[in-house]
Image (cartoon, rainbow, N blue to C red):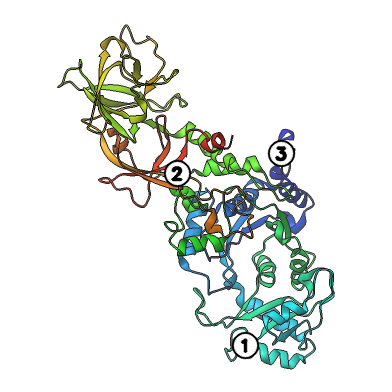
Amino acid sequence: MSVNEAVNPAPEKEGGLNFVEQAVADDLRAGKNGGRLSTRFPPEPNGYLHIGHAKAICMDFGVAEKFGGTCNLRFDDTNPVKEDTEYVDSIREDIKWLGYDWGDREYYASDYFPQLYDLAIRLIKEGKAYVDEQTSEQIAEQKGTPTQAGTNSPYRDRPIEENLDLFQRMNAGEFDEGSMVLRAKIDMASPNMHFRDPIMYRIIKHPHHRTGDRWKVYPMYDFAHGQSDYFEGVTHSICTLEFVPHRPLYDYFVDFLADESYRPRQIEFNRLNLTYTVLSKRKLLQLVKEGLVDGWDDPRMPTVSGLRRRGFTPDSIKAFLTRIGYTKFEAVNDISLLEFSIREDLNQKATRVCAVLDPVKVVITNYPEDTVEDVDMENNPEDPNGGTHKMPFCREIYIERDDFMENPPKKYFRLSPDKEVRLKGAYIIKCTGCKKDENGNVVEIYCEYDPETKSGMPGSMRKVKGTLHWVSARHCVEAEARLYDRLFNVENAGEEKERDFHEMLNPESIKVVKNIKIEPFLAENAKPGAHFQFQRIGYFTPDSKDSKPDSLVFNRTITLKDSWQKINK
């Protein structure tokens, strides 16, 4: 797509641009940066990406796609203590799963450590940076408050030569961590707290995952970010609203490098906040370390890998992000909208199958004992080209225990004595009795079938009020189902400051059901990444870690209906 095509879309689409896209379109029309567009997604490799990052990914890569530009993947690896190559690999996988590709444009902040160090030396020589030996607590105290000016550091006016010598010795490893920092000399009375001599470098004596022990000083985000954008040729640095007060400092540092021909522009949008969800990376890491979840990709986690393992699709996440939009105002989004998005997507895509989670045997007494016949089961009624698959039917089947009641209330349309139901895809059956154990539990149900009610038979159009899913007792395969629910049971879990987040965990966020009965077609097609609707139960996917051909495990992606909304009402 040419720039002209990108910035002059069809009239009916012009009003569909969000404010970030409109700003980009305006810059391109004005010919800024030579009419070039380059964005970047800059994750820290200190954890797995969560759905909030997915919103940023779809913005950064999506804007580049829409307007014919490029998007870089740049790892903000400026803190070696918290970083790991495991996180780098997971970030790459998540972005590609969402459908984006950065080509050969993978960069790291550490690529620019030499240039950043040289710029720091330059600022020291120009009298615009100094080495401070105060403690972090002293520095925080002397910064003042938003309504009270800060006070100068006692080291603010030390000679340039001394600052140069100390900074170089800091990088040589001569001083302990926390003993010194390099600060920019700007304005301790500025109304913007970020201008009150911000820290540019600190001492970290920990091997870096890419540069090893070469560096003993590492740049702070506010100093490294804008300069990395500039070194990389980024034109639009799109980030979340908490960086609005950082933008003047971003521009201040960029001014030391940029000229009229090119400079990056920072634009901010609202971050993603979800009900019943915590998106603090620190708290998510705590859940992992304390073993409260099964790793970063636990299907209850709001991480991209967790959502993928649970059965969410890239299309469902993108549809959700489109629904909530990008604005300049912070808001908390209802998680039920995310759940609606995955239901809507899987309703179109998921293959319908039969699985019985709490089985009880049904014996069809008038059906021949040695006969097995195949019935046709529709794969997806929403897909006109979905086709059908075969399912074996015989004398003994399993149905859900909840689908039988010996003494039912009024308007109970499932199986009960002397009542008829249709077995989905097969026959109408009528209950003639049941067998109980010594504790009064039903262990077998007895029925008779009407042979004229199968599809194509004269009685196939006969109506009954209830339709049940079922599996053949002789042909079914045993499996395990993991019924996942929301990890937190407090609506504003992400906003709670006073309450220990452990107290907000949902004790029923996972229920493991062993020995469920599934139809053979499901067992044969339970491949990683496949999506199924268990008839009348919910949407499921094979677990990517634990499911094996001889030991199938299915994760419930979502229920068929919003049960939480029903409970709340």
Horizontal side, residue 175 vs residue 266: left or right: left
Q: Quadrant of residue 158?
A: bottom right
Give the residue drawn at x 80%, y 65%: 260
Question: In the image, what residue type sits under mark 3?
Answer: Gly
Q: Nearer the viewer, residue 473 or 84?
A: 473
Circle number at residue 170: 1
Would you name the residue on which mark 2 appears? Answer: 311
Q: CA distance from mark 2 to mark 1?
A: 49 Å
The image position of residue 280, as x and y in percent, is: 58, 59
Q: Residues within 10 Å of mark 2 (few under 14, many from 20)?
A: many
In the picture of the structure, the residue carrying the numbered disc 3 is 16
Mark-to-mark CA distance, 3 and 1:
52 Å
Badge 2 amino acid: Gly
> What separation in Å lies between label 2 and label 3 (alpha carbons)?
30 Å
- The crowding category of the residue bearing disc 1, from other C-alpha atoms within 10 Å (few below 14, some 14 to 19, many at least 20), is many
Q: Residue reaching furthest front?
A: 439
- Closer to the camera in the image, 430 or 559: 430
